Image: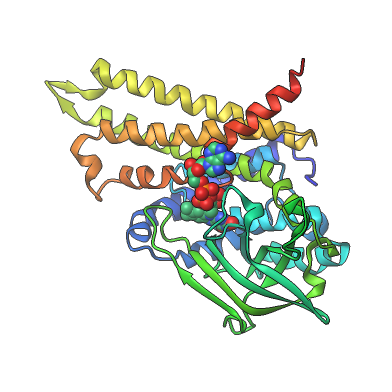
């Protein structure tokens, strides 16, 4: 649960993040993105900034930040470079799952190590045949004495190469109806103390359009053994519910990444529009460009406000799936819109890898896909709407 934070605390934290982003993140973004090179130094800096424990409660040594402050941190990072946010975002989604659904023993054993960044990871839900329809997964876990044996393949798993832990959604019963009652979640450590993969796990890095530098991989389990003690919550049949229960925070997080991309793209475009001249004046003075900038700025602000609304509701403990869905949908579409419009404002130079805007353009689309596609978000919003306005 989040602790009480004063306005002064918030300003101090955001100021610290600002300095880090400007001194250490923005300057390396182009090189690391283009070479698809993992930013190990940022991981060490995230450890000292406490980011691996940002939303983990103080009971386990974390900062216990509310979603409202956390979302502002995510916007700041993504407005310079969206990708490195994935290193702590996916990690914290895993942590939130353990904190919400784990047994007391699991929380005490796992969370302090996650806060320190000694354990770093993400969540492994998606499979080659199952993304939006998670209940269709085929990876199985079968009980064998004090262990379970996992077989199957996960795909698009963030932090699986450079991290060392995952929360893995599996089937412990393939026959039961409804299908979600056959799903369970396991916390697994993927590597030994020497950073070698444990037997039965293979990780293959995927090449991506954007969100480069951060490891997204296929993860294949062949008779991978996990102690039964690592069944999250200690009970089979809860995996799907545990996974979707964390989606509100996950959606606020993706909304913030989209809003950060929107803000960053707008800032690049505003600057360029004042520098670039055509027909004897800066292009910022042409009405066609002004219309674009006006619309971009409005979407940036609207996204920020929707995120604030969803985060405040989340922090107050109220159900906020509709608000988080709206923020995710609008924030991510704002990212795509602003990146697209900024590309047009940059003209031919938008196509040059010398300029940062092409990275925003490549990174933006992912936010419409992850944490539930935007098609699914609108379906969730609509279902909630009917529930709230029932006749
Ligand atoms: C870079 C990257 C990183 C990722 N990281 C992770 C990760 O760390 N962990 C993880 O588990 N997953 C991760 N994912 C996977 C991501 O969550 C899925 O790609 C996403 O959930 C969509 O699933 P899918 O790709 O199987 O698309 P599908 O579910 O096959 O959907 C295809 C299309 O059909 C639409 N659709 C599907 N069902 C419906 C419906 N009922 N009504 C209307 N439209 C529908 C979708 O909106 C989409 O347009 C990542 C993906 C990417 C690209």
Q: Is residue 253 above or below residue 120?
A: above
Above-or-below relation of 345 to 69: above
Residue 108: tell me if it is visible.
yes
Q: Where is 380 relative to 17, above or below?
A: above
Which of 334 and 373 lies nearest the eye of the viewer? 373
120 lies left or right of 40 = right
In the image, taking residue 159 as reference, residue 205 lies left or right, namely left
User: In which quadrant is the C terminus drawn?
Assistant: top right
Residue 128 % position (x, y): 52, 60
Q: How many marks?
A: 0
When asked about the image quadrant of residue 358, the answer is top left
Residue at the spot x=61%, y=84% of the render? 199
| Left or right: 158 as drawn, with respect to 58 | left
Nearer the observer, 239 or 133: 133
User: What's the residue at 86%, 67% (across, down)?
Assistant: 105
Is residue 86 visible in the rendered image? The answer is: no
Give the percent coordinates (x, y) of residue 180. 74, 53
At x 48% / y 64%, what residue is drawn?
215
Picture coordinates of residue 267 (x, y %)?
A: 38, 34
- Image location (x, y in percent) of residue 266: 39, 32
């Amino acid at each position: 649960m989040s602790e009480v934070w004063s306005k002064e605390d918030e300003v101090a934290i955001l100021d610290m993040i600002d300095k880090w982003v400007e001194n250490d993140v923005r300057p390396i973004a182009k090189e690391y993105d283009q070479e698809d090179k993992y930013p190990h130094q940022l991981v060490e800096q995230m450890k000292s900034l406490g980011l691996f424990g940002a939303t983990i409660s103080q009971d386990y040594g974390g900062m216990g930040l509310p979603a409202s402050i956390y979302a502002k941190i995510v916007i700041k990072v993504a407005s310079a470079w969206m990708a490195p946010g994935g290193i702590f975002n996916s990690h914290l989604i895993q942590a939130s799952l353990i904190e919400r659904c784990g047994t007391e023993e699991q929380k005490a054993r796992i969370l302090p190590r996650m806060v320190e960044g000694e354990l770093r990871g993400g969540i492994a839900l998606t499979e080659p045949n199952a993304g939006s329809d998670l209940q269709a997964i085929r990876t199985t876990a079968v009980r064998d004495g004090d262990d379970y044996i996992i077989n199957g393949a996960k795909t698009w798993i963030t932090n699986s190469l450079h991290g060392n832990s995952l929360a893995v959604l599996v089937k412990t019963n393939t026959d039961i109806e409804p299908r979600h009652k056959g799903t369970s979640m396991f916390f697994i450590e993927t590597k030994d103390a020497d950073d070698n993969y444990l037997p039965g796990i293979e990780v293959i890095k995927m090449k991506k359009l954007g969100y480069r530098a951060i490891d997204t991989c296929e993860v294949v389990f062949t008779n991978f053994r996990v102690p039964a003690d690592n069944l999250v919550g200690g009970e089979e049949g809860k995996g799907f519910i545990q996974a979707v229960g964390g989606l509100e925070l996950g959606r606020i997080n993706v909304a913030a990444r989209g809003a950060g991309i929107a803000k960053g793209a707008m800032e690049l475009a505003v600057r360029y529009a004042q520098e670039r001249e055509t027909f004897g004046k800066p292009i910022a003075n042409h009405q066609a460009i002004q219309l674009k900038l006006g619309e971009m700025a409005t979407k940036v602000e609207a996204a920020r406000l929707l995120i604030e609304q969803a985060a405040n509701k989340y922090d107050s403990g109220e159900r906020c799936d509709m608000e988080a869905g709206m923020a995710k949908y609008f924030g991510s579409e704002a990212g795509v819109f602003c990146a697209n419009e900024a590309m047009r404002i940059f003209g031919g130079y938008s196509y040059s890898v010398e300029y940062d805007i092409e990275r925003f353009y490549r990174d933006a689309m992912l936010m419409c896909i992850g944490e539930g596609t935007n098609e699914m978000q609108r379906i969730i919003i609509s279902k909630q709407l009917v529930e709230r306005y029932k006749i």
